[in-house]
Amino acid sequence: MSRFEGKKVFVTGAGCGIGFKICREFAEAGAIVALNSLDNSETIEACKNINTDLKKEVVFPFPGDLSDTDTITNSIKDFAEKNNGLDVFVANAGITVFSKFLDVNVKEFDHLMSVNMRGTYFSVQAAAKEMIKNGTKGRIILMSSVNGIQAHLWSSAYAMTKAAIRMLAKSLASELGKYGITVNAISPGATGTERTLEDEEYVKEWSAVTPDGQIGSTDDIAYTALFLADKRAGHINGEEIVVDGGWTTNSPLPENLKKTLTH
């Protein structure tokens, strides 16, 4: 039997990058997966890609904006009802605001909070309710960031949301533990994705300031998510796993970024 045979998994922000890889790994391990992404066509295409590769239909599209709480909570409820429960929920969706503190405007700040904070909070709430309703000893995995641990210039708004997600994991572990539900966070460091690799210097620059001499991959984050979701990790609760090759030990910035931030 596959590691997650028959388990029901819902992943937000999974049209590409880390979320997509998490969906793929769970599907390969036997799970039934709900793939959420903002764009309808991207969501459908992402599911098609995984299902085609695996030669079976186990990943299903649930497009929707995480900031639209009614849509995302209804999607979670719908998936759980169709599949007789929910075992794992990965709150991966999030957006970034990289801007000087004095330049951040209310509109972009509110959008950031509506996705990273409100969207995460209420999607997790909806997932927990489904787990409790079905008596599932579920796993909730939140996606934080090293930006929520180590501060640097131009990331104040984004960083505060990721720091809050770390605390949310601790708070919910205490509240949901009595139901057999664990809540943990993953904090990736520099990771190669479709978005980050658009910068031709990204790999070189970040590898140079990471103790193990390389950037992270989506594999690294996905494998961590599957570890936390495994039944053998059931006594890990309210914790954070930092996947950054050791970057947060001293947190140096790449030279190009350092020059940008000081001008």
Image (cartoon, helix red, strand yellow):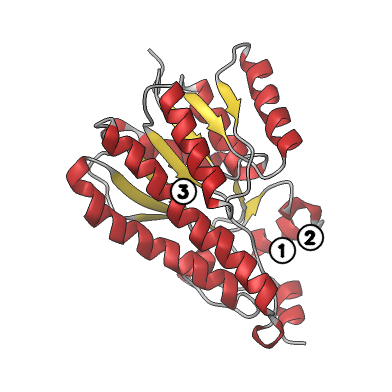
Residue at the disc numbered 2 = 201
Q: Residue at x 66, y 78 (%)?
A: 106
Residue 126, relative to residue 202: is it above or below? above
In the rendered structure, the answer to whether residue 22 lies left or right of residue 53 reads left
Residue 216 in the image: state x and y as whole percent.
59, 50
Q: Badges 1 and 3: C-beta atoms under 8 Å apart?
A: no
Give the Cα distance between marks 3 and 2.
35 Å
Report if the CB atoms under discs 3 and 2 are less than 8 Å apart.
no
Mark 3 lies on residue: 123
| Residue 86 located left or right of residue 250 | left
Residue type indicated by callout 1? Glu
Q: Which comes before the other along the chain, label 1 or label 3? A: 3
> Which one is nearer the viewer's eye here, 6 or 150?
6
State the mark number for residue 205: 1
Residue furthest to the left in view is 178
When asked about the image quadrant of residue 204, the answer is: bottom right
Q: Disc 2 residue type?
A: Glu
Q: Secondary structure at mark 1?
A: helix
Please determine whether, in this image, residue 90 is positioned above or below residue 33. Answer: below
Q: Are marks 1 and 2 in contact (CB under 8 Å)?
A: yes
